[in-house]
Image (spheres, rainbow, N blue to C red):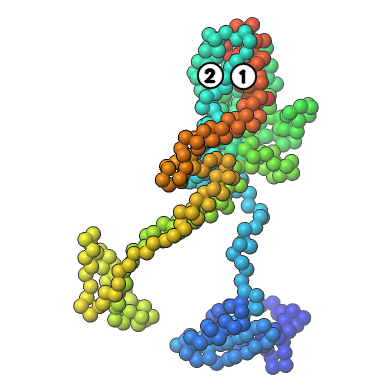
Amino acid sequence: MQRIEESELIINSRGAIYHLDLRPDELSHKIFLVGDPGRVPVVSKYFDRIEIKQQHREFVSHTGLIGSERYSVISTGIGTDNISSFGTYGFNPITREKVKLEWVHRGSWIAACAIDMPAEDMTREGVEITGEGVKPEVIEQVEEMATALEIWTNVEKALKWGDLYGGCIAVMMVQGQDYSTPLRLDTIGKGQFKGIFVLDRWHVRPSLNDLVTEEGPFLGQPKFYTVDESSPGLRGYRVHYTRVLRLIGIDMPYDQTLTENLWGESKIERLYDRLLAFDSATAGAAQLVYKAHYRVMKFSGFRDAAAEGGDIYQHFAKFMSMLRTFQTLEGITAIDTDDEFVQEANTSFSGLAEALVHFGQQLSGAMQILLKSRLNGSTKTLWNIRLQQSMRAAKTEILKMRNSSEELKLAAVGIFRLIQILRMNRVEKLLFFMILFINR
């Protein structure tokens, strides 16, 4: 063992450590720490015998025996850290923990709502195609092709995986073309457009050292995406950035995106601490409810059995297990004639619902999903709200979300330029142009 320097461990004239005034033989290996020096005698009064009492500055120390076991109680003068101080902001990038994100998404209905609801609501109705001179039958053909190619289903999937993983691309598939070359609309022949293929960030590798240099909305983004060999499709393809719809979850400052290989942040990461708090609160509330009904019995020799352990304790544990088995739904309990049934009680708890609602409201605010009508469902008796008003408010929030989404907002702008494509008389080009503008 390395010797501690005298400057670091000051010893007084009686061979005791200076700050505690304790020698090694005056201290037990089993120590209770308390903050306030006045609490030391409160604890040591339960000792069978106190051997040592020492005090120096704010440090009070008592060492004694409980039976044959030796214990020490020492005051620290300041107490332990407040529990709230553990709500710190440090290095906890769960965006990089793919498996954890997937289990949270699969196992938590709240996390599933946070990821799935916005994407589903934003894509449920597609986009409205309007414009002067756009014939209804052409719009109908475009919508039919979008349905056949599952365009909005895949856009929804891309939105979900972008929010879950912090990064996702949807590759615009054009049959017979080199995906590593820039996309040119005038090179797409009839029937070549085959829809979009969604790949999350873990199945593609962005070109971190080869970025877009052309001025515009894509400046500084990866120029190419190489599809991993573990991908379900397009394995080994090198895809030019003009051929993908790129979604990154939550955008971050550039230095932070470098830590994520130029992707964004998972939405789950910002919810994670509140999600744990809500889960802990609901689990704790459930435990209280489980224990709301209790019975108290007296057993002769219980304390000795628990202290001695061994066969007598095993016999008691077996008896309790059998007692639970014999407890019937009619309330009949079988006990020994030497034992005594003391009381039966039911406990009620106040404030649980309010506490859970407050935790839920924190999550609702973080997710920007209305708690009462979307996240937890709505009933007039539970939440004391009017359902129709909440649903109208929820719809307003979704419309606001759609309008604030750059992908969908700019897609709508692109629709107004469809007249230029209509003259080509190719429905698939019209649809492709619409998807192309989702990425713009």
Q: Which mark is residue 434?
A: 1
Q: Which residue is at a point 29% across and 67% down the rendered structure image?
A: 321
Image quarter of the N terminus: bottom right
Of residues 273 and 157, the one nearer the viewer is 273
- Disc 2 marks a residue whose amino acid type is Ala
Of residues 60 and 104, the one nearer the viewer is 60
Of residues 261 and 303, the one nearer the viewer is 303
Q: Which residue is at a point 70% across and 21% down the rendered structure image?
A: 182
In this image, 30 relative to 243: left or right?
A: left
Q: Which residue is at a point 72% across and 33% down the rendered structure image?
A: 221
Q: CA distance from mark 2 to mark 1?
A: 10 Å
Secondary structure under the numbered disc 2 in the rendered image: helix
User: In this picture, is 314 found above or below 403?
Assistant: below
Image quarter of the C terminus: top right
Residue receiving disc 2: 146
The reply to whether the C-beta atoms of the residues labelled 2 and 1 are less than 8 Å apart is yes
Q: Quadrant of residue 399?
A: top right
Secondary structure under the numbered disc 1 in the rendered image: helix
